[in-house]
Image: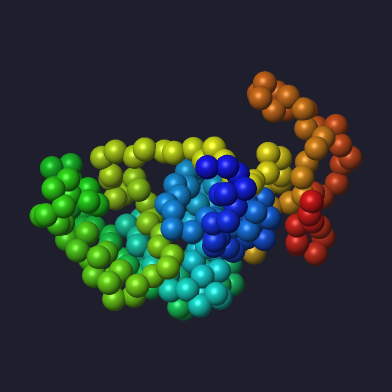
Amino acid sequence: MTASELDVFPRASTGIEGLDYILGGGFPRNRMYLVKGDPGAGKRTLAMQFLLAGVRAGEPGVYATLSESEEELRDVARSHGWSLDGITICDLQASEESLKADSQYTLFHPSEVELSDTTRTVLDVVERVKPLRVVFDSLSEIRLQAISTVKRRGGSHEHSIRELRIDPDGIRVGRQLGEFHGVLSGRLDYTGEAGPLLGADGHSSQP
């Protein structure tokens, strides 16, 4: 499939203007995406902004969480000035007993017959809400036995370096940075002018 053919896929806004620009309009729909990063990298912030973009577009969303309670998630959202109203939070936090190694379940049982309580809960919520956007937080907690990461090799997306900033307003993506050298060598040099990379008004500037 060519890049031009991939571009006809309908896309879902990420909720982040700069990231939508880079991705050519957002994530291609009806796909699964793994967001990976160290603690504090902005994974949960991205997830919330993605679901909130769905709320604005009239698309039902579900946030399935084992990492934080519903109250903790709402506190995180409030710290950014957001409300999670319109998003169904499926709180899957396990008890201390269920976190023991000998009592772990994967999200999907291999036989797909003897479903765990976690799976039944998720399926019940999905059947009731019929969401168009779903977030699972996190895979390490859900403990899938095998994850195959597929690299997207086609489609319209940028091959540029941009500033990424996480602040009280969420995740923001800045303009292209063409003055960096030695990216692949591990020794990064910046030869551009000093100054803020994101505009003073808080918005990214494209290109």
- Tally the numbered discs: 0
Residue at 28% of width from left, 44% of height from top? 144
Q: Give coordinates of residue 83: x percent, y percent.
A: 52, 75
Residue 131, how many percent across, how many down? 39, 70
Q: Quadrant of residue 68?
A: bottom left
> What's the image's color scheme?
rainbow
Outermost residue toward the top? 185
Above or below 8: residue 57: below
Q: Residue at x 16, y 52 (%)?
A: 112
Q: Where residue 195 sits: x, y (%)?
A: 85, 46
The answer to whether residue 97 is visible is no
Farthest-out residue, left: 114
Q: Position of residue 163 (x, y in %)?
A: 71, 46
Viewer-proximal residue, 5 or 177?
5
Q: What residue is at 57 percent from the left and 49 percent from the top?
A: 5
Residue, x 50% and y 77% (percent of image)? Answer: 58
In this rendering, the answer to whether 80 lies above or below 179 is below
Can you say whether 84 is above or below 178 in the image?
A: below
Q: Is residue 142 visible?
A: yes
- Asked if residue 185 is positioned above or below residue 34 in the image, the reply reads above
